[in-house]
Image (cartoon, rainbow, N blue to C red):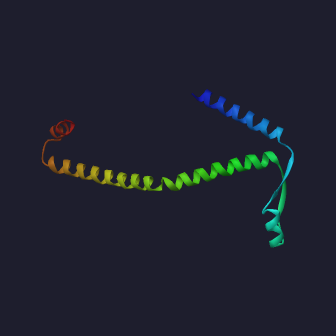
């Protein structure tokens, strides 16, 4: 399974490298369309290789997806923490009740009774 995972990562790296090499031309990224820029009076722009724009957009999308998924699952993690606290509390109560039940009995008999 580990080799399959490494093989998948290697294929993905090769695909990304070939896309990067095939798209080395520079593109201008502008903040606003020309008509809106004329109204506002400025239009900042930057010139980047196309593969940087594509891979940057891909990375930003993946990062945004992870953040949104983390926020969506918050209620499930909180519920799991609450349930874990309840389990610990009930486990302590069961142990206390077992000690209370077996108080004054022979230790060996108490262990045998707890095992069954």
The foreground one among 46 and 116 is 46
Residue 112 sits in quarter = top left
Q: Is residue 13 left or right of residue 24?
A: left
Locate the N terminus and report the quarter of the image it occupies.
top right
Can you give x and y, in whole percent of width and height, for residue 93 in the image? Answer: 24, 53
Residue 113 x, y percent position in the rendering: 16, 38
Along the viewing direction, whichever of 63 and 108 lies nearer the viewer: 63
Looking at the rendering, in which quadrant would you find the C terminus?
top left
Is 97 situated left or right of 3 in this image? left
Tell me: residue 57, above or below residue 35: above
Seen from the viewer's position, the closer of residues 95 and 71 is: 71
Position of 41 with respect to 75 (left or right) is right
Q: Residue at x 40, y 54 (%)?
A: 81
Residue at 78% across / 38% down in the picture? Answer: 19
Q: Position of residue 72 (x, y in %)?
A: 50, 54
Residue pictured at 56% horizontal, 54% vertical = 68
Q: How many marks on residues?
A: 0
Residue 39 in picture, x, y percent from top left? 81, 72
Q: Residue at x 47, y 56 (%)?
A: 74
Determine the residue located farthest toward the bottom in the rendered image: 40
The quarter of the displayed image where residue 8 is located: top right
């Amino acid at each position: 399974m580990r080799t399959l995972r490494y093989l998948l990562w290697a294929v993905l790296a090769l695909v990304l490298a070939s896309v990067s090499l095939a798209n080395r031309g520079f593109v201008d990224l502008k903040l606003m369309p020309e008509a809106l820029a004329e109204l506002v009076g400025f239009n900042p722009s930057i010139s980047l290789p196309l593969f940087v724009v594509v891979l940057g957009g891909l990375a930003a999308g993946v990062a945004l997806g992870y953040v949104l998924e983390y926020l969506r699952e918050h209620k499930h993690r909180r519920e799991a923490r609450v349930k874990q606290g309840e389990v610990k509390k009930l486990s302590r109560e069961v142990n206390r009740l077992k000690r209370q039940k077996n108080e004054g009995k022979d230790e060996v008999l108490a262990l045998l009774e707890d095992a069954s």
